[in-house]
Image (cartoon, grey):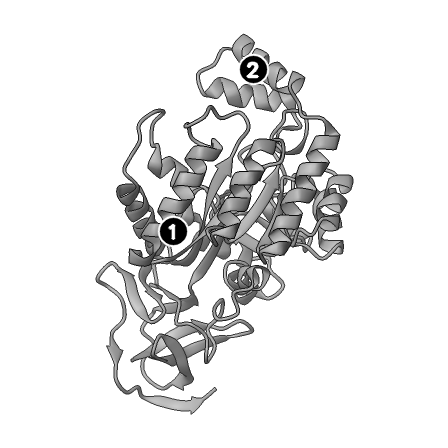
Amino acid sequence: MWFSDAKIILADRIIENGALRIENGVIAEITESVGQPSGFTVFPGFIDMHGDMIELELEPRPKVDFPMEVAVGHLDVRLAAAGVTTAYAGVSFSRSAIDGERRSFEHTSAIIRALKDNIQALRVDHRIHARFDMTYTDAIAALEDLLVAGAVDLVSVMDHTPGQGQYRNIEKLISYRMRGGKSEDEACAEIQTRMDNAVPVEQLLENLHNVSRLCKAYGVAMASHDDDTVQKANLMADIGAVISEFPVTMEAAQLAKERGLMIAMGAPNAMRGQSYSGNLSAREAHAAGLLHILAADYHPAAILPAIRALSETDMDGLVGAVRLASKNPAKALGLNDRGEIATGKRADLAVVDAADRVVQTFGAGKIIFSNGSGPETAEQPAVAAVV
């Protein structure tokens, strides 16, 4: 099958009018085209290494539980329609969760196993990203069981105790809690209780080293989350993290890069030009050379407009911005068979029209999304020269 007369975004350059051939789910040939340009652009399928959407799909309102097949099926369509072909579903283990509730280790473990059971029937290549609260000592055993079962593909470690990390600014955290309907007194009391019940540093370090040991033993990549200081970024590098997710300060991001970590930030942040929580701007990090990966975070449709926004300032233009959602996350996560439009790679593609809408998405050469207006395919193209 051939795509012809389209702009093709390669990892190092753009073919303004090209064609590519798909055979047995992989890209078999890339050529220049001599036909009239169609107005369509072919991007590599986007790889989302951090998406928090599944928990909201499963519980769209507090205590309103949706069936797994409904929640996962809807998220699958949303991702494909955004051009995402590989997605790491973020599911969390949280110490503050009550047994059986969202983010408790019983509930999260059940979600992970159910996701794995449903994955084969889905369009997008779904992976599991276990978000581990480093204060949650009791969940380590559950995490180990899941790693033994091969049910987890990425682990990130975080500490959401108020006063540090993402929530280092207590006043902003109080305002955020109040937007959820709490009074100022209620928000202050809740936050103070969490600070009073903080886990001792010695226990945090022991938990971190245990999670690191498990990740290394089972060959699963580990990411840090919300690094806010040079000291924390150094610690995460020391224990083997390969990705720094959503660093809170420029100093932490700079140190993480110097230590060899790839830095991931949210596409909504980059699209909007600011963090919703008032932390480091993805655009500022990008301008400083401190952004390697764009993640959907909470909205997969933000990936394409974020790429467009960052392409305006990227030293490699659109090509460099596209790598943030394709080749770079593939490299960080060890996905050697995808992440770019190149011969021999999986035919994971996002086809975009002149209005910048994703009109078709291909996963391993098969259409996994179409709005009915994508380019035509053919058995033979009109070509000029193989590139």
Q: Specify few, some or many for label 1: CA neighbours under 10 Å numbering under 14, 14-19, or 20 or more.
A: some
Indicate the position of residue 210 as horizontal and vertical percent values: 66, 43
Q: Which residue is drawn at 34% across and 24% down?
A: 63
Indicate the position of residue 305 as horizontal and vertical percent values: 45, 52
Q: Is mark 1 on a helix, strand or loop?
A: helix
Q: Is residue 323 left or right of residue 315?
A: left
Indicate the position of residue 333 as horizontal and vertical percent values: 56, 59
Q: Specify few, some or many for label 2: CA neighbours under 10 Å numbering under 14, 14-19, or 20 or more.
A: some
Q: In this view, does 381 lie above or below 229?
A: below
Give the number of the mark in front: 2 or 1: 1
Indicate the position of residue 283 as horizontal and vertical percent values: 59, 48
Per the model, the C-alpha gap separating discs 2 and 1 is 35 Å
Q: Which residue is drawn at 28% across and 87% down?
A: 380
Q: Is residue 45 left or right of residue 257?
A: left
| Residue 56, quarter of the rendered image | top left
Q: Can residue 269 be seen in this view?
A: no
Q: In this view, does 30 lie above or below 214?
A: below
Q: Relative to the observer, which residue lies in front, 95 or 368? A: 95
Q: Is residue 205 left or right of residue 4?
A: right
Q: Residue furthest left?
A: 372
| Residue 52, quarter of the rendered image | top left
Q: How many marks?
A: 2
Q: In this view, does 193 lie above or below 383?
A: above
Residue assigned mark 1: 116
Q: Is mark 2 on a helix, strand or loop?
A: helix
Q: Is residue 175 above or below residue 226?
A: above
Q: Residue furthest bottom?
A: 385
Residue assigned mark 2: 190
Q: Which amino acid does label 2 sit on?
A: Glu
Q: What residue type is labelled 1?
A: Lys
Q: Quadrant of the N terminus?
A: bottom left
Q: Can residue 168 be seen in this view?
A: yes
